[in-house]
Amino acid sequence: MITIIAAAGRNNELGKDNDLVWHLPDDFKRFKQLTTGHHIIMGRKTFESFPKPLPNRIHVVITRNSNYKKNGAIVVHDIEEALDIAKEDIQPFIIGGGEIYTLGVDYADKIELTRVDGTFDADTFFPNIPEDKWNLINEVSHNKDERHEFAFSYQTFVRK
């Protein structure tokens, strides 16, 4: 089961200048819980936004640069190659950024989306989720609180 995991604002905003535009500790905790032990597929910019590779995950990085090499990453050059590397994983995760989400949505079986209740100045966006192709099967709300500047909800979609 190929799963896309993302957090996006009301207007599908993902981030700006290769960084998130919010800080939601409970969402980070959920991301870690869901992706630990799995392949995480991402673009080069997403990989480089991490201070170091995330523990207990296999990093598969998609880039057009044929000379790109990084410790802690398996480097590939297209989404099919990335998915092939992760084929033995029961649930590889596509973790971004915007271009990789757009490429991956045609291959995904499930989307785990954290919908952040706000609009943000962004330069990277999540693709639209067409209602004719996806069913929202679960939604859990999280209110704004002392640790979370914005309310948000965890939405799970499965392909129809």
Image (cartoon, grey):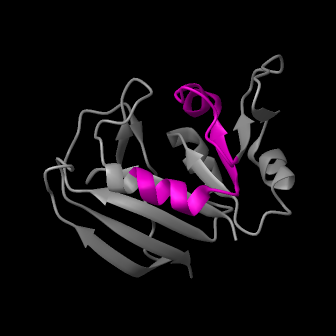
Q: Is 85 situated left or right of 65 in this image?
A: right
Q: Is residue 88 left or right of residue 159?
A: right
Quarter of the image holding residue 44? top right
Residue 31 vs residue 2, the one in the foreground: 31
The percent position of residue 139, horizontal first and vertical second, equals 34, 76
Q: Residue at x 57, y 70 (%)?
A: 110
Is residue 42 a member of the stretch shown in magenta?
yes
Q: Residue at x 25, y 54 (%)?
A: 10
Residue 133 in view of the camera: no
Residue 117 position within the rendered picture, expressed as x and y whole percent measured from the top left: 20, 56
Is residue 55 shown to the viewer in this render? yes
Q: Where residue 105 sits in the image (x, y, percent)? A: 59, 58
Q: Is residue 64 above or below residue 87?
A: above
State which quadrant residue 68 falls in.
Answer: top right
Q: Nearer the viewer, residue 62 or 86?
A: 86
User: Where residue 14 appears, x then y in whole percent?
Assistant: 38, 42
Task: Please identify the residue farthest to the top as the structure is shown.
Answer: 67
Residue under the image location 40 percent in, 80 percent down? 138
State whether residue 42 is above or below residue 158.
above
In the shown orientation, is residue 80 left or right of residue 20? right
In which quadrant of the rendered image does the N terminus lie? bottom right
Q: Which residues are the magenta region?
A: 28-57
Is residue 84 rendered to the left or right of residue 30?
Answer: right
